[in-house]
Amino acid sequence: MLASVLWILLMGFFAGQIARRLGAPPLIGMILVGIVLGPQVSDVLSPEVLKSADNLRIVAVMIILMKAGLGLDREKLSQQGTVALRLGVLPAAIEAIAIAFAAILIFKFDFPTGLLLGCVIGAESPAVIVPGMLRLKSLGWGVTKGIPDAILTGSALSDVLLLLVFSLLLSFFDRGKVENIMFPGGFSLSAVQLLPFQVAMEVGFGVLIGYIAARLTVSLLTQQNWTQNAVQDVLIAASLALLLVIFEQAFPYSGYLAAMAMGFFLIELDPPLARRLRGGFDSLWIVAEIVLFVLLGASIQLQVLGKTFLPGLFVLAIGLFIGRTIGWYFSTLGSNWNWRERLFLLPGNMAKATVQAAIGGIPLSVGIEGGEIILAVAVLSILTTAPIGAWAIPMFAPKLLERGKVDPTKVTVVTRNILLAAVDTSPFSTDVLLKAASLARRVDGEVIVLHIINMAEKEAVEQLRDRTQKLLSDIRHQFITITGSVPEEIMRVAEQYQVTDIVMGKRGYQPWKKVLVGSVSQAVIENSFIPVILVDERKI
């Protein structure tokens, strides 16, 4: 089992990086590795790992939904009015119905079986859509109109709806009919008639339980201070979120929606805590993503694709280009989205993966006629839409969406921390280097050590180079020597290397030949758009 875990992590990581370097989404490499490692090809994964695949997928999906919740923006969602709600109902529902009718014509299904296939295929993949939308938010694409937020929320709601209908249809096949539910006074409703109430109840309870969990998390981690560091904060928050997902089997609420709501309410209740958790869940997703997509590839049954390949593609095309497109049109009708932003829904909201992997084989396992075809089309939807969707989101966002200002309180903005240490050859340079080293260690940053050279001080420069190597031995750094005007060269190099901070010394107004003078530091401060940190000799 441990060997299988190592195969998954190492092979999945390097395959993902190879795919990324070739210009493809990393998940493509991970899925292909899963297929190779799985029972269909090399069969090197232990049965214990394959049996636990569903549980591991639940953990991975919980992590990605918490990331989604911690990245939602309430103000942007409120600006969209009912767009997010309509995106959560219309595209998936109309796609499921279109697939049902297509399956009746192509596979000779009856309508309940066709609708069962539609529910499997119509669900959207949080494992593809959530990281894609969060990346767009971190880059600013579509954030002005809240397009990534609307897609995130809509995809979560659509999965709730289709999973409910899927469960109802399984009950229908299991008992031959859907039983009526009696109310006081002799009034009765069928399960189909109760479906809107079930959806509303699961959504309502999911949001409520997510809010309660967020309140509990804030109380434990902030008010009562049960934890001492960010790692413990993430451990407690992830455990509570996983409990929400697990307990949905015993209570009438959506566990996935509750986990996403928990992250959303954490932003509202305690933004500093949400920021710490966001970084922790980003780190968890690095591992969870590999496990999720490698096991997804390992679960794909290649032998079931034979006869249904071309008919399955045709059914998927009908669902996507007819059903889902109609749903997208009515979802954004009356909104402030232009035609380019509406067109972005095609690549941004099409991916299938995790839900199909989780429920695609259930109809076959319970003996429903046509279950093998349902599984084959589910596998086909994963192999086609997941890689295409993951590739198309970053590819078409710059072409179809407008770029707005990034809100760092809602997403993790990934930046390289690069410090520029401007030094001379005096002993005072040691203090500047120590300060730069201290700052770099705090933020895991890099240091550019800059010396504006005087040709008469060649030996002193070598001593400065040796001093730099000793003081920054555990930090990635470069030592640069150039000639020119001191303030201008400091600012030019800072812009060239896109540094985040400039660290330099100040000793008062003394000649540059001895130290980095106050007049130089004053000139840099007045003209630089980059923050400047001064090390004052008089305070050392």
Image (cartoon, grey):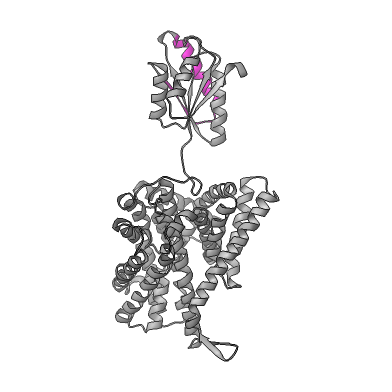
Residue 511 point in image, percent of width and height: 48, 9
Q: Going by the image, does 209 lie left or right of 38?
A: right
Looking at the rendered image, the quarter that the N terminus falls into is bottom right
- Residue 251's place in the image compared with 394, above or below, is below
Look at the image and tell me whether residue 73 can be seen.
Answer: no
Q: Is residue 248 left or right of residue 301?
A: right
Q: Considering only vertical position in the picture, is 290 above or below 41? A: above
Residue farthest to the top? 456
Q: Is residue 286 above or below residue 358?
A: above
Percent from the top left, x then y, of residue 118? 39, 74
- Percent coordinates x, y for residue 176 in the rendering: 48, 88
- Magenta stretch? 457-480
Residue 383 on the magenta span: no
Quarter of the image holding residue 107?
bottom left
Q: Residue at x 52, y 69 (%)?
A: 203
Label the magenta part by its dominant secondary structure. helix
